[in-house]
């Protein structure tokens, strides 16, 4: 059973069917998954979730799959660790750290988003999955593809350090190095996906892929006793997790699993690469790399 009603453009509101699409034909805005929250509210409960396996699929009603998950059966539900000593140093009475370094199978947050994307790729009937990556994403895609028995291609910028390549190569994908930077690789992958009908988790499957990031929010709330944190700091990197964390908390409120206690979300980025932070400081919606 699916609770997805379709896709919708974040910019202009144009609606689309549930297909491997990621960009609006009208305004080129990003597409996002839409759900029937009234039906979800009648189908989900804390007790229902508690009775399920300790993985990210315990929140399946709020994730964009139609049937039973095919991969990611051991992904998610990572520890929320109480950091007593660090909290004392920072002057925070209750400080917790969400430890995704023990995620399965590749010890990365990417296992969350890839689990959802590959499961959806299987439902769409794709036989080849792929990604543009500089490391962790390639590892996760290769691992999940091997688990599902799918062909896998990994596209990377030429000159990527060997340590980042080894992590995915042990799963047997076909690795292709492209002359250029990550943006060049991403543009090429968009063309390849259209031409060969391959499932690129961070291109034509991006609306589904990004929904996996919400499971971070779901788990944190459940692990806090079905309460929202007062404040949460999230490493934003490319920006996928930041809005999805907010969406995840909002959905829990909408379907009645938590109360709205006014959680504040803060973005953190490296000083030398902080386009989101710079945009926030300038008070603009325009994010410049």
Image: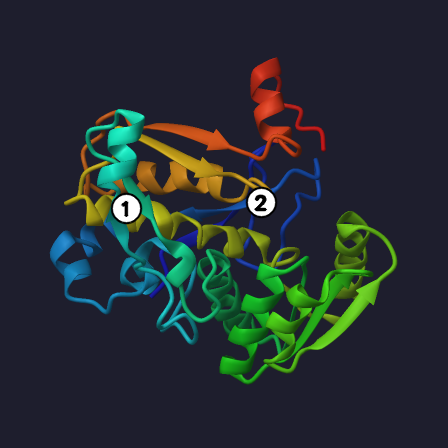
Per the rendering, the mark at residue 220 is 1
Q: How is the image coloured?
A: rainbow
Residue 17 location, quadrant = bottom right
- Percent x, y for residue 238? 60, 42
| Closest to the observer, 287 or 3 | 287
| Closest to the observer, 236 or 59 | 236
| Residue at (56% x, 40% y) in the render | 239
- Percent x, y for residue 104? 41, 68
Camera-side mark, 1 or 2: 1
- Percent x, y for residue 70? 42, 76
Disc 1, SS: helix
Per the rendering, the mark at residue 31 is 2
Viewport quadrant of the C terminus: top right
Q: Residues within 10 Å of mark 1 (few under 14, many from 20)?
A: many
| Residue at (35% x, 33% y) in the render | 232
Residue 89 location, quadrant = top left
- Percent x, y for residue 280? 56, 20
Q: Residues within 10 Å of mark 2 (few under 14, many from 20)?
A: many
- Left or right placement of residue 281 versus residue 261 in this view: right
């Amino acid at each position: 059973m699916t609770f997805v009603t379709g896709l919708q453009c974040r910019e202009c509101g144009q609606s689309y069917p549930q297909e491997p699409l990621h960009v609006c034909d009208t305004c080129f805005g990003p597409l996002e998954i839409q759900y029937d929250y009234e039906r979800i509210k009648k189908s989900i409960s804390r007790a229902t979730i508690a009775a399920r396996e300790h993985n990210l699929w315990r929140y399946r009603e709020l994730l964009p799959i139609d049937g039973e998950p095919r991969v990611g059966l051991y992904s998610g539900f990572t520890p929320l660790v109480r950091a007593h000593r660090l909290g004392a140093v920072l002057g925070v009475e209750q400080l917790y750290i969400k430890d995704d370094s023990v995620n399965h199978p590749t010890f990365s947050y990417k296992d969350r988003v890839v689990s959802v994307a590959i499961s959806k790729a299987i439902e769409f009937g794709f036989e080849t999955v792929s990604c543009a990556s500089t490391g962790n994403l390639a590892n996760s895609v290769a691992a999940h593809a091997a688990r599902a028995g799918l062909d896998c291609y990994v596209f990377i910028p030429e000159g990527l350090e060997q340590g980042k390549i080894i992590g995915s190569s042990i799963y047997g994908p076909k690795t292709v190095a492209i002359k250029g930077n990550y943006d060049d690789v991403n543009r090429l992958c968009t063309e390849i996906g259209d031409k060969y009908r391959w499932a690129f988790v961070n291109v034509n499957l991006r609306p589904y892929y990004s929904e996996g990031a919400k499971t971070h929010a779901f788990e944190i709330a459940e692990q806090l006793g079905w309460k929202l944190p007062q404040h949460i700091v999230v490493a934003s990197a490319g920006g996928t997790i930041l809005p999805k964390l907010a969406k995840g908390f909002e959905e829990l409120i909408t379907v009645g699993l938590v109360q709205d206690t006014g959680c504040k979300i803060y973005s953190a980025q490296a000083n030398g690469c902080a386009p989101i932070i710079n945009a926030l400081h300038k008070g603009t919606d325009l994010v410049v790399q």
